[in-house]
């Protein structure tokens, strides 16, 4: 449980960095809230949903796509991460990526950072 909370906080900070320091930051991700203020709660919920999907849905997708993953020498895992991010994007209406390229870029950064956190 402690590692899940640490991972949630670190990946939420990564997501904030991705929003604010990426080029054209306001065009990459739209955060829709009822007020005009920025919602940190929506970011924590979004990252929590991604982590939840990584725990429960990602192993199923990896097993189903095992032949395709073997043919592409594991590069299909980027597509699986992209599917997880897009699914979380659809589940959380407050956060929306403006294009699929931005979602794919975030999924690559997210998977790399998540694997570094898991290593330590």
Image: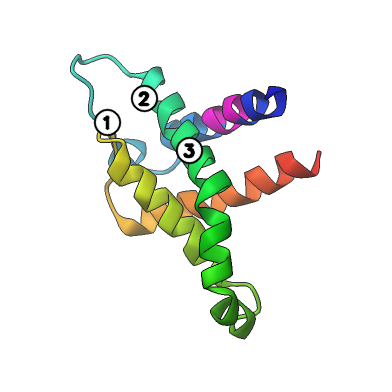
Measuring from the top left, give residue 72's x and y in whole percent.
Answer: 59, 81
Which one is earlier in the sequence, the residue at label 3 or at label 2? Answer: 3
Say which residue appears at 42% left-offset and 58% top-offset. 83
Q: Which residue is identified by label 1?
A: 94
Q: Which residues are magenta?
A: 8-13
Q: Main secondary structure of the magenta part?
A: helix
Q: Where is residue 70 shown, x and y percent of the image? A: 64, 81
For this view, does 116 lie left or right of residue 43?
Answer: right
Spatial CA distance of label 1 from label 2 is 7 Å
Q: Residue at x 49, y 62 (%)?
A: 80
Please name the residue shown 46% across and 54% down the image.
Answer: 105
In the image, taking residue 4 as reference, residue 85 lies left or right, namely left
In this view, the mark in front (1 or 3): 1
What secondary structure is found at the residue carrying circle 1? loop
Q: Residue reaching furthest right?
A: 120
Comparing marks 3 and 2, which lies closer to the viewer? Answer: 2
Q: Which residue is mark 2?
A: 42
User: Circle 3 is placed at which residue position?
Assistant: 18
């Amino acid at each position: 449980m402690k590692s899940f909370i640490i991972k949630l906080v670190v990946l939420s900070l990564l997501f904030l960095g991705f929003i604010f320091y990426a080029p054209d930051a306001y065009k990459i991700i739209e955060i829709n809230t009822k007020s005009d203020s920025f919602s940190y709660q929506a970011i924590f919920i979004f990252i929590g949903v991604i982590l939840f999907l990584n725990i429960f849905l990602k192993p199923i997708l990896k097993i189903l796509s095992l032949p395709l993953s073997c043919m592409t020498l594991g590069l299909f895992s980027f597509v699986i991460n992209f599917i997880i991010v897009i699914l979380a994007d659809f589940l959380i209406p407050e956060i929306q990526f403006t294009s699929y390229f931005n979602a794919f870029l975030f999924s690559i950064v997210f998977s790399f950072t998540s694997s570094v956190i898991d290593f330590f």
